[in-house]
Image: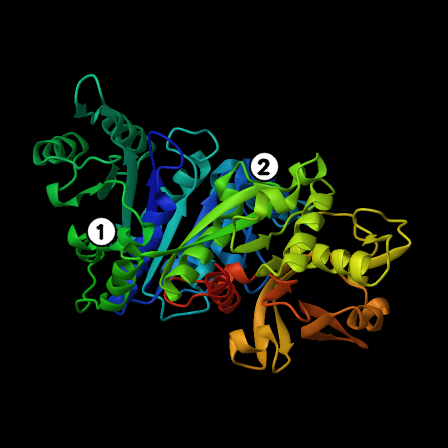
Amino acid sequence: MTKYVFVTGGVVSSVGKGILAASLGRLLESRGIRIAMMKLDPYINVDPGTMNPFEHGEVFVTDDGAETDLDLGHYERFTNTNLSQKSNVTTGGIYNAVIQKERRGEYLGKTVQVIPHITDEIKSRIRMLTAEDEDIQVAIIEIGGTVGDIESLPFLEALRQFRLDVGPPQCCFVHVTLVPYIEAAGELKTKPTQHSVRALRDIGIQPNVIVCRTGPHRLAPEQRRKIALFCDVMDEAIISAEDISPIYAIPLNMKRQGLDDIVLRLLNLEAPEGDLSEWESMVQRMGALEKRVKIAAVGKYVEHDDAYKSINEAFTHAGVANGCKVDLTWVDSEQFENGAEPAEVLREYAGILVGPGFGTRGVEGKIRAVRYAREAGVPFLGICLGMQVACIELARNRAALANANSTEFDPECADPIISLLSEQRGIKDMGGTMRLGAYRCELKEGTKAGTAYGKTVIHERHRHRYEFNNRYLEQMVNAGLVVSGTHPKGDHELVEIMEVKDHPWFCASQFHPEFKSTPLKPQPLFRDFVKAALAQG
């Protein structure tokens, strides 16, 4: 029978539950434990696909096309678990399912209520996570939000019931809290953690492990004992989680304090000691990088670091693969529409990335940045919208199509180099209706992409509604376009990767390569882009 670890958070949001869950997953996998992972999110959106990146951060996409919370990206980067649509559940998704059942008469006329109908639906989703794989030994389930939030109450009540359903030995509760340092007093204060645990106990859940975020400080033995005493938790189950850089060193800190041993003991599981040597070596290399390379990432959500979380991490992985630290600077594309010259802003960088996005804001600025990279011979990587604006730029300035554009930005443009995917026509709903998930891409030998991957067929993840318009293919090829990756689609091939002739390294993909990058397996396009930038700089 599958065992369950539930990760809750207290005191403040963004306390690090996702990284903690991912770190525990890494430790258990290193000991031969088969795991599954899930995020329960308390917001009413059915999924984060329609949410503004400024508000929620990036939308992470799984192989099977789920638009999910960015914490799932941490799960995949830290572990070997391939996540799916079952791995992210929201309040909106739960209520939507319950309402649909009520409309179909499945509740036989009963009054539909939070208890038992909403909580039963939550519990069923937890069971579904491992229903098709009997070999899963431990499911790690993170609950979004903070204990005390109204939104998270149905999830916590469902977990209380779930523990009774499967029996206490099958469950373990890990509570992540903030222990703030008060400068005037010169000490860490445990009272917020005590109140947070009391709020959790009022709901009927007693945590078994408390992970204390302490900033740059570390819990002293007396503070550890105080928290254990007031919260009714074993001393050794009070874990100090001070700020550590890089984040990939966090599993090693958890290992030193025996987090995996404690959890396995609580779940009555036995496992051999794990081998973290490869992970330790990677962390050591990451901390000993001497070479540096400066890369500019041109985007429009630059004020919010989480908006491009996977891209940031992919550059970290690519830097380690090349033995260098990537100094990544996010550059607002709108400034290039308001008088700033790309040559002046970008000339200090050895590589330029133009990232994904939606809507017209900042697009012309991105096009100007692409032109600078192409004409100046600066290594360039485009992602999703980045590929589309690269095609528009080439069409306008090399193919004599001065009015080239995307129908996303100008539905009546004279030369729609980028147009709506045929299957998107007539779609009204915005959520979950894009071309999503992993698709086959066939690579051409001798191209930058073919060299990077070292294979002829790959599968990468997508999130888009628009595609390159093949009506212009011949004209664009004559202007210097190289199609290095395609997806067979009915009577034509969808352009997946484009390059530019006679350029040191210019490559752009319709898919999102950043979603499959991990510190132990850096993404090939990012790796070779950083390599080209190093050679340039």
**In the image shown, does 206 or 82 lie closer to the viewer?**
82
Residue at the location (22% across, 24% down)?
Answer: 191
- Where residue 195 appears, x then y in whole percent? 27, 25
Residue at the location (47% across, 43% down)?
Answer: 119
**In the image shown, does 22 or 144 lie closer to the viewer?**
22
Residue at the location (57% across, 57% down)?
Answer: 66
Which mark is on residue 429?
A: none
Q: Quadrant of residue 28?
A: bottom left
The residue under label 2 is: 111
- Where residue 401 appears, x then y in whole percent? 86, 58
Q: Quadrant of the N terminus?
A: bottom left
Residue 400 appears in view: yes
- Please rate how many residues cluster around mark 2, counting C-alpha atoms within 10 Å: few if below 14, some from 14 to 19, many from 20: few
- Where residue 76 appears, x then y in whole percent? 42, 60
Q: Quadrant of residue 46?
A: top right
Residue at the location (68% across, 40% down)?
Answer: 336
Asked whether the beta carbons under mark 2 and mark 1 sit within 8 Å of each other, the answer is: no
Distance (Cα) linking label 2 and label 1: 46 Å
**In the image shown, does 127 or 421 lie closer to the viewer?**
421
Asked if residue 303 is positioned above or below residue 65 in the image, the reply reads above
Left or right, residue 395 beside residue 498: right
Left or right, residue 101 beside residue 421: left
Q: Check the image and name the residue furthest to the top.
A: 184
- Where residue 31 appears, x then y in whole percent? 24, 67
Which residue type carries mark 1? Met
The residue under label 1 is: 254
- Please rate how many residues cluster around mark 1, counting C-alpha atoms within 10 Å: few if below 14, some from 14 to 19, many from 20: some
Q: How many marks?
A: 2
Which residue type carries mark 2? Thr
Residue 166 appears in view: no
Which numbered mark, 2 or 1, is in the foreground of this view? 1
Which label's residue is closer to the chain start, 2 or 1?
Answer: 2
